[in-house]
Amino acid sequence: MTTASGQQNHAQTAASRVFANDALSLGLTLPLLRAGAIVADFDEQLTLARLADERGFRALWVRDVPLNSADYPDPVGHLDPWALLGALAVHTQRIALVSGAIVLTLRHPLHIAKAALSVDMLSHGRFILGLGSGDRPPEYAAFGRDPHERRELYRRHWDTLAAALGKPSRVIPDRAPEGAPAFQLLPGTANTVPLLAVGSGGQSVDWIARHSLGWMTYHREPDAQRARYSMWRAAVERAAPTAFRAFGVAMRLELSRDPHEPAQPVTLGYRTGRHALVGILNDMRAGGTHHVTFNLASERPAADAIEELAHDVLPLFQPEP
């Protein structure tokens, strides 16, 4: 089994810039849409991605939404994550690219490994592979999977994926008939693509602390988030006491045009002006959060919000260019 402790040579240009001890970095989740919009112009998304890169955001996050349904709360039509990540790799220069998250249980791990290596190579080592398990039983049925096997599928696929992306790479076939050749995963890269748990995947926090670069979760109200972080730190002390393990949060942000507007909770985040946002982020940094990715959703054009955040918020947490 390949664990996170065996992945210390991961891409420092990506992982250590996004996740660093006693620091907080900021990212953005694509697509960047106005509140209520459900159709993304992906040419515009690439333009916004370049802007985020130029302005110093540390990460762009891309979701994996295989299927849509009228019963789902998210009506947005997302591009295939690997196609979008490939485009982002050649349209940006410095910003980390993170999958948030590839549905590990519904994709073959060797296909994921091949795609991850490809994005990492195209982006020159800027890729972080975030992995989730999916939580919609009808999608499991559509792909011929049993949702009751979610936990075991996640662990088994993680092990196969980690072995394929490790140094040295090992391809673990589903079946190995007599006389079958040994396989390689090419092209190889100098870096080991870091693996990040997004959500729990049905696993214990101890399992996540042993195997993953860190744990990415959704925003919760402050008391609940502090309790969740305390649980995480205890797991890290038990399972990986000598290693750094990151903690990150995905937050909905409705950034008001009024910089003095007080923060008001909304689903999975806040509506707030930038001054209150800075206070929220300072509290999160003090509480142990290493990265926050914003899911922008307001009446403002996304470029306008990006510019304000870059000018007035990023320098308080990311002082270097």
Image: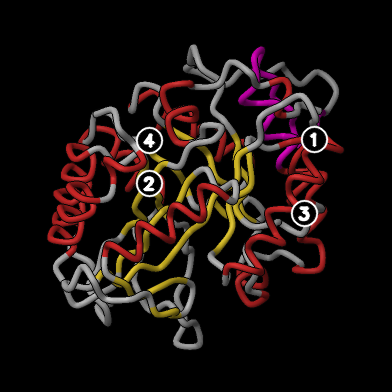
Q: Is residue 175 left or right of residue 64?
A: right
From the image, tell me which residue sits under label 4.
96
Q: Earlier in the sequence, mark 4 or mark 2?
A: 2
* SS class, disc 2: strand
Task: Name the residue carrying label 2.
Answer: 26
Residue 252 appears left or right of 89: right
Q: Secondary structure at mark 4?
A: strand
Name which of mark 1 and mark 3 comes first in the sequence.
1
Q: Range of the magenta residues?
A: 158-176
**Whole-percent x, y for residue 11 in the image:** 49, 22
- The amino acid sitting under disc 2 is Leu
The mark lying in front, picked from 1 and 4, is 4
Question: Is disc 4 surrounded by few (<14), some (14 to 19) or many (20+) residues within 10 Å?
Answer: many
CA–CA distance in space, label 1 to label 4 = 35 Å
Residue indicated by mark 1: 175
Return the mark for residue 48. none
**Disc 1 residue crowd, few under 14, some 14–19, many 20+, Cα 10 Å:** few
Residue situated in front as seen by the camera: 7 or 243: 243
Q: Which residue is mark 3?
A: 231
Instruction: Where is residue 240? Give x, y as percent.
Output: 79, 31
Marks 1/2: CA–CA distance: 43 Å
Q: Secondary structure at mark 1?
A: loop
Q: Nearer the viewer, mark 4 or mark 3?
A: 3
Number of numbered discs: 4
Q: Residue at x 63, y 77 (%)?
A: 138
**Is 208 placed left or right of 85 in the picture?**
right
Q: Do residues under tags 4 and 3 come within 8 Å of each other at their CB atoms?
A: no
Q: Quadrant of the N terminus?
A: top right
Q: CA distance from mark 2 to mark 3?
A: 23 Å
